[in-house]
Image (spheres, helix red, strand yellow):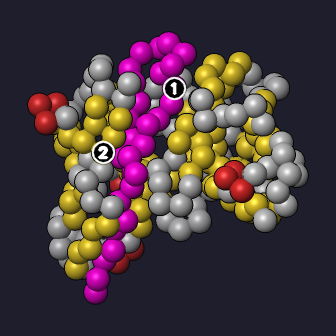
Amino acid sequence: DTGVSQNPRHKITKRGQNVTFRCDPISEHNRLYWYRQTLGQGPEFLTYFQNEAQLEKSRLLSDRFSAERPKGSFSTLEIQRTEQGDSAMYLCASSQGPSNQPQHFGDGTRLSIL
Amino acid sequence: AQSVTQLGSHVSVSEGALVLLRCNYSSSVPPYLFWYVQYPNQGLQLLLKYTSAATLVKGINGFEAEFKKSETSFHLTKPSAHMSDAAEYFCAVNTRGGGTSYGKLTFGQGTILTVHP
């Protein structure tokens, strides 16, 4: 169990640029989640996958956001035309099976928009 | 819809004192409940979970929590605080069931625990 891995750990970019984050879940986990955390707040759900299927997407996720999990393994989260309000910590988590199983979190990608 | 309220955004205790972090939840169905801890610039680490077995749940690092259905609470306690417990703590709820809406966690706003020597 190597844990959930997220890359990069930090990303600084100019407003209007596109960014992509990667998440590698724990290998046997079939569920993968993305959350966003702003300063002083708890994480907020963005989207989740069961295997390669994206099963739920939050209304927080505008059309500028897209997530994929092409082979049911790693996932990417892309933000197009970044805005100041996108500055946050983006957390990935994975779990195996039903909702009583805990989600295991990566260390996150901190995005700063200049 | 489900929600979580953590009473007290900051809690300060002396080393060796009792730690009590409060969490109340709202859920239309019996919930699964979790406590996570977050250290600066890190992700969330699971402390403990309640999934309908014993109502008193023991977790890592000496923490425990009691599920009280009548009070819709899941407060986190530790008998004796240690300096290394200083961190931010999050209570979270997940919904039972196997449908597609049952995967996400809803978090409280967090409680920052400070431990004084």
**Residue at 59%, 42% in the rendered image:** A35
Residue B3 relative to residue A60: left or right: left
x and y percentages locating residue B78 in the rendered image: 23, 61
- Residue A9's place in the image compared with B1, above or below, is below
**Residue at 38%, 46% in the rendered image:** B108
Which image quadrant: the C terminus of chain A? bottom right
Residue closest to the eye, B88 or B63 = B88
Q: Which disc, if any, is residue A6?
A: none
Residue B32 in sight: yes
- Residue B63's place in the image compared with B5, above or below, is below
Residue B64 in sight: no
From mark 1 to mark 2, how far is it between C-alphas?
20 Å
Q: Amino acid at mark 1?
A: Gly
Q: Which residue is mark 1?
A: B103
x and y percentages locating residue B64 in the rendered image: 25, 51
**Residue at 68%, 56% in the rendered image:** A87
The stretch in magenta equals B90-117
Q: Residue furthest bottom?
A: B117
Q: Mark 1–mark 2 contact, CB under 8 Å?
A: no
Residue B75 relative to residue A29: left or right: left
Q: Which residue is mark 2?
A: B5
Question: Chain letter of disc 1?
Answer: B
Q: Secondary structure at mark 2?
A: strand
**Which mark is in front, 1 or 2?**
2
x and y percentages locating residue A28 in the rendered image: 65, 31
Residue B77 relative to residue B102: left or right: left
